[in-house]
Amino acid sequence: MMGANPPVDYGYGSTAVSIAVGGELTMPFKKDYFVGGELEYLGCVATPGIRYSAGMMAEDIGFKTHDIDVRLLGGYDFHKANGMTAWLRLGYHYGAFSVSNLNNLAKLPSETFKGPTMGAALRIPRLAKKIGAEASLDLVYPGTRKQTVGISDGALQKAQAATLDLLGMYDWKRDWKLTGGYRFGYAASRWSGTSDRVPTATSSKRTDLSHVVTVGLGRAF
């Protein structure tokens, strides 16, 4: 139960249905290297969403998220029997958090979060018979978070994020793979100045954590 006004710092969470799609194009460069590009999209829909109570009133706050990543890739081939390669990833991230009702009791704003990314990945396509694996870590810094005018947390001072991806692959049929993945997302933001959400606040901070599990198909061309 919350008071009449939402506090500056508090926790909330929700489950959501997610869909992830992506594509990658790579080509060999000289003897030991690869170059290429990648595009990824992750969308989530949460309904009823976040349950919030204020005094005698209560509300379910639904929301959607959209995350798009565009990357340039540079890979190194270790020339091992398992096909292991290491990758450097440079790109740009755009994320959107869209609240279904901006007049919600918690005064939660819709937001965009974007910024340049830098990361690395390790890929082992033949970890065992018909089984492959990949792990990657990407950082967003400096990030920019923009909130709905009139219900923002103040003037943004700092924003950053990180994403860890773990992916398993099974050779199902020729050129087709069954995939299973786990993504852990972290984002931190800090504001100063008068908050539109809570006028008595002069500074605030927030940490966002997300856990996404996906299963699907991969196709090589």
Image (spheres, rainbow, N blue to C red):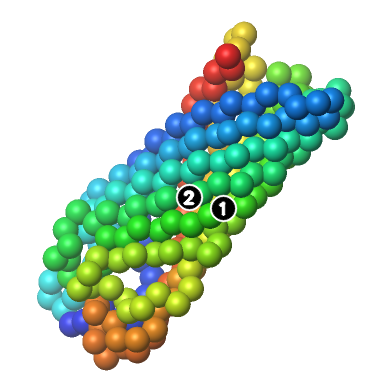
- Residue 123 drawn above or below residue 160: above
**Position of 150 compared to 22: left or right?**
left
Q: CA distance from mark 2 to mark 1?
A: 6 Å
Which quadrant does the N terminus fall into?
A: bottom left
Please indicate, yes or no, whether residue 16 appears anywhere in the rendered image.
Answer: no
Q: Where residue 176 sits: x, y (%)?
A: 57, 15
Question: Few, some or many C-alpha atoms within 10 Å of disc 2 (few <14, some 14-19, many ≥20)?
Answer: many
Between 91 and 47, the one lying in front of the other is 91
Q: Look at the numbered disc 1 and give the secondary structure of its residue.
A: strand
Q: Look at mark 2 in the image and give the residue it sits on.
A: 93
**Position of 79 compared to 24: left or right?**
right
Q: Look at mark 1 in the image and give the residue it sits on.
A: 117
Query: Quick check: marks 2 and 1 in contact, CB under 8 Å?
Result: yes
**Position of 94 compared to 48: left or right?**
right
Disc 1 marks a residue whose amino acid type is Thr
Q: Where residue 80 sits: x, y (%)?
A: 87, 27
Q: Earlier in the sequence, mark 2 or mark 1?
A: 2
Q: Look at the numbered disc 2 and give the secondary structure of its residue.
A: strand
Q: Residue at x 14, y 65 (%)?
A: 103
Q: Where residue 181 sits: x, y (%)?
A: 56, 37
Disc 2 marks a residue whose amino acid type is His
- Residue 149 drawn above or below residue 73: below
Question: Few, some or many C-alpha atoms within 10 Å of disc 1 (few <14, some 14-19, many ≥20)?
Answer: many
Between 36 and 126, the one lying in front of the other is 36
Q: Residue at x 56, y 46 (%)?
A: 91
Please identify the quarter of the rendering in which residue 124 is found: top right
Which quadrant does the C terminus fall into?
A: top right
Q: Residue at x 52, y 28 (%)?
A: 23
Please identify the quarter of the rendering in which residue 129 is found: top right
Q: Where residue 182 sits: x, y (%)?
A: 55, 42
Please indicate, yes or no, whether residue 45 appears anywhere in the rendered image.
Answer: yes
